[in-house]
Amino acid sequence: MEFLRAFLSRSLERKFVFFMVAMVAIAIVSVSSITTQGLREFILQSFQTRVTEKLSLAAIAVDDSDSGDGPDLTRARRLLISLHVDPDLVCIAYLDGRMRRQAEPLVNALPMGIELTPTILQSNDPILLYPQTGSDNYIAWTAPTRVGGVVAVFRKDGTERQLKNMNTRLLLVAGVVCILSCFLGLFMARLILRPLERFITAMRNITVGEEPQELATLDQNELGEWTRTFNLMIEQLRRKHDLEKFLLYREKSELVMHLAAGLAHRIRTPLTSISSLTQLITQGGDSRKLKEWTQVILTKVEQLDDAVGQFVSYAQPGPLHFEPCRLSESLEFSLSLLAPDLEAAQIAVSPQLQDESEPELLLDTQQIQQGLMNMIRNSIRSMPDGGKLTVQLTYPPVSQGAPGSARIRLEDTGHQIPEEIRERIFDPFVDMTVEHSGVALPVAARIFELHGGTTTLEYSEEHGNSFLITLPRLSLEELKLRSTQTD
């Protein structure tokens, strides 16, 4: 049963042919059982008619040959010559009722071991004869004449042989019908399933990203309607795809224009200062002024280099090198590097890191540290008058997050990010008129995204900002796949 289920589950065509042949076979068996019973009755009735006919002919031939001195058996044999062609007739014999002697054969000879006496004429029912030699059984019927009677002996298995031949013919017919039903089922299955196969192929091509193609059809039935509906869906998908390409192109164009405008602003401001100071230097002055102006120019050049470097980091991040590490160590290292800036800004740090049971994650340590430092610098810029920065690292249980995922929460008490740019804070150069401008946050968010993580700004009614960074615990293959998809 399992083999049949597995065999049929591989193809709808097999199922269609199998069930069609099964239905034909059930119909043939049902019809054959009814037909066989009717044929049996017909054959038995036909056999009885033949027996009656031959006994009547034999009795008439014997009576016609009787001229008063007894029947002329030679003449009777000539009259019954046509009965030799019956394959089931063994013999016809004449029994003289006045003489106690062996029967005289009229048609064929008596079988060996069969003895017929006039006493058999007293029975009106068929008589079963058992020969003394041999294994065949015979049935005898009698018919009276003017003097004595005639006996027709038939093979007992005559009717059974006819039924067997008839059953053989029925089996041949059933086999031919089953073969024809197989071809018919195969033809109908292909006629119905070929459009489905083309439909499945077209859908598979769509799922792998190939250009959707319409299906040709001339049918006016349900399959034709199905195909026309599919073609309509393909047309709508093509229009939607074209619209998405247009919107993506426009979005990319707007992004490029936005990046270009932001980068130009970041570059133009230092260049303006450099140009003005260069003009002052060319006019001359005391050495102290010249030194101050030169130092300002160097500072502006560093700003230019920082702007270009951050833009390159966002547009084309370097290759990632993943290795097992503890996230708390990267947090501690980032805080230690920025400790002078935190102290100068009079910002108190409250680290809440994981204990020694912290699991290891596959991370690019340098990239993660760069992202964390960008986030901490953003908090420093939001607190020009000092404040408090809380750094919290937790690993939630399975019921509250992905297994082994890490959550980093950075909470500061500085100026809140304006509501109008809150949803776009991770886009580069969101608004150059506010302090929270640049690409530091977008670069950090992209680094965490390359690690399969997310960065969100949580709204707080209280003073300050709260950033939540989530980093899942992924395998090396998953990380490489995510970083490739992100690129």
Image (cartoon, rainbow, N blue to C red):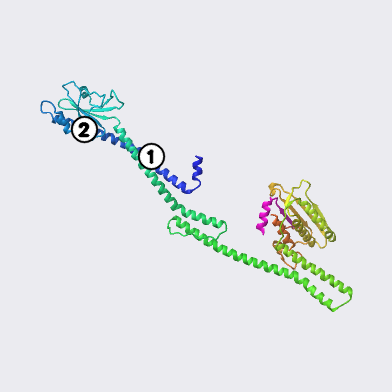
In this orientation, which residue lies closer to the viewer: 202 or 460?
A: 202
Q: Indicate which disc, 1 or 2, sits on the residue closer to the N terminus.
A: 1
> Percent position (x, y) of residue 424?
70, 63
Q: Position of residue 333 (x, y in %)?
A: 80, 54
Residue 17 in the image, given as x and y percentages of width and height:
44, 47
Q: Which residue is mark 2?
A: 54
Image-quadrant location for residue 262: bottom right
> Given the image, on which type of amino acid does mark 2 rest?
Lys
Q: Which residues are magenta?
A: 463-487
Q: Badge 2: how crowded within 10 Å, few (<14), some, or many (20+)? A: many
Q: What amino acid is at disc 1?
A: Val
Q: Is residue 450 visible?
A: yes
Q: Residue furthest bottom?
A: 283
Q: Tell me the crowding category of disc 1: few under 14, some 14 to 19, or many 20 or more residues within 10 angstroms, Cα based.
A: some
Q: Position of residue 200 (x, y in %)?
A: 51, 54
Residue 163, picture quadrant: top left
